[in-house]
Each structure stands twice: as structure tokens, then as C-alpha cells.
Amino acid sequence: MKIGIIGAGNIGGNLTRRLTALGHDVSVANSRGPETLADLAAETGAKAVPATEAAQGADIVVVTIPEKRIPDLPAGILDGAGPDAAIVDTGNYYPQQRDGRIDAIEAGLTESQWVEQHLGRPVVKAFNGIYAAHLLEKHQPAGTPGRMALPVAGDDPAAKAKVMALIDELGFDPVDAGSLAESWRQQPGTPVYGAQTDADGVRAALAEASPQRPSEFTA
């Protein structure tokens, strides 16, 4: 598949490493320009491109940047992606630690619903609760007992299925976490966030989640 990655931090960089190793055609971008990604491109074989070109022709686009930077993305940044492309949001809202106050999220909009509004395309929330190192260290073949699982939330069944298949290929069991409106169940401070557990454990953690955002994740 052709995969675009917007953001080359810990998650974006390690997804670039894993996805190129699996044979996917990866274009990766950051806010500082492709020349700053020369080492990652040389290491992985990914194409370092301007952010405005990362989605061009992509089957999946992963947006993995700090929440506060979402409004700064260029208008139409996803226009080059095909109409059936799955757009993945890996982001988390850290108001005290990084992002400052985002009124719409504080008023009850889920993080990914807010991202979706800014991007103008339906998104699938995934990879937001996994430690970046675990993308490299914790993957296992399908069917392995106790295989680590990741929750996936979204409203477009086809896009969600595409992302869940990619997660399986990456070596983790995907778990359907419901709609984007329900994606608060995997936001920071919930039982599943950062959990290293199998599919049954992820389902149980999602069920235990409270819609009340913990005080350390509110502004």
C-alpha cells in the first residue's frame, strides 16, 4: 500500500520503520521540511516529502502531530489522498503538559472528533495509546497467545477495517472500540491508554472507562 505519514516524531518515525520493513510505499513529512528527514529516509527507504505532498495517492494517511498543531496544518493537506483513503489520527490532548486549552474538547468533543473537524475528512483513531518503542519491540505473529492488542475507533466501517488490517499486519490484534463519539474510552487517563494487554484485556479496559476526563488531562 501507499502510506503517507504526517509527523515524524516517536510514533511517526517508528511507524515509518515498521511499514517500510513490511514493504509498504511510505512518504513521510514533518513541519521542518524533507531535508530534516534525510537520515530517516536513508535508514528506511521511505520518501521524505513536504507535508503538502504526504497524502498524494495514499491508501492510508497517518496524522501524528501534537494536538495543538492540528489547526496549523495547511488547508487541503489531505486533498491528494484518494476518496477511499483511511485517515488515521494518533493524537492525544495534553492540556497541562503540552497543548494548552482547547475549548471544544473541554466542552465534551472527543479529541478525534475535533481533529476530524479540522481535517475535513473522517478519521480513525488508532495508535494513540501505544508506546512508540513497542511498535518495534512488541509485535508478534497473528494467533500468538497473549498478543498485544490496540483499540481502533471510527465511523467509516471500510476505513476502520483497512486500519485494523494494517494493525494486524504490524503484529498486534486490532480491537473495534466503537464510533468516534466513543473514542473517549481510549483517551489519556483511561484504563486502556498505555495498556499492554491482549484483545480480551483491551475490551475489558474499554468497558471500564469513565467519560469523566481525569483532572491531569483537563485545562
Image (cartoon, helix red, strand yellow):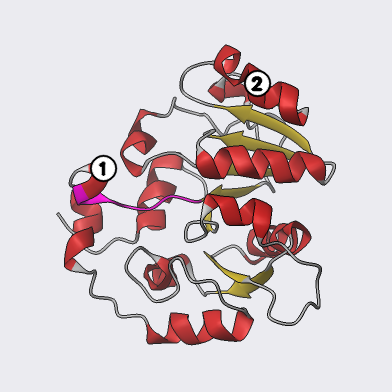
Q: Is residue 150 left or right of residue 213?
A: right
Placement of 53 over or under 24, stated as above or below: above
- The total number of labels drawn is 2
**Residue 89 place in picture, x, y as percent:** 50, 50
Q: Is residue 142 above or below residue 69?
A: below
Magenta stretch in the rendered image: 90-96
User: Which of marks 2 and 1 precedes in the sequence?
Assistant: 2
Q: Quadrant of residue 69?
A: top left
* Percent x, y of residue 49: 63, 20
**Residue at the location (57% across, 51% down)?**
133
Q: CA distance from mark 1 to mark 2?
A: 28 Å
Q: Residues within 10 Å of mark 1 (few under 14, many from 20)?
A: some
Task: Give the answer, above or below, for where 16 lies relative to 115.
Answer: above
Q: Main secondary structure of the magenta part?
A: loop
State the quadrant of the N terminus. Answer: top right
Residue bearing mark 2: 39
Residue 145 within the magenta-colored segment of the rendering: no
Callout 2: helix, strand or loop? helix
- Percent across and percent down for residue 160 are 63, 63
Left/right placement of residue 52 relative to residue 191 reads: right
Q: Amino acid at mark 1?
A: Asp
Q: Say which mark, if any, is on residue 99.
A: 1
Q: Is residue 157 left or right of residue 207?
A: right
Camera-side mark, 1 or 2: 2
Would you say residue 91 sits in the magenta stretch? Answer: yes
Amino acid at circle 2: Asp
Tell me the residue at 24%/47% (across/down): 97
Answer whether residue 59 is visible to the viewer in this image.
Answer: no
Which of the 4 image quadrants contains residue 134?
Answer: bottom right
Is 210 in front, or is 123?
210
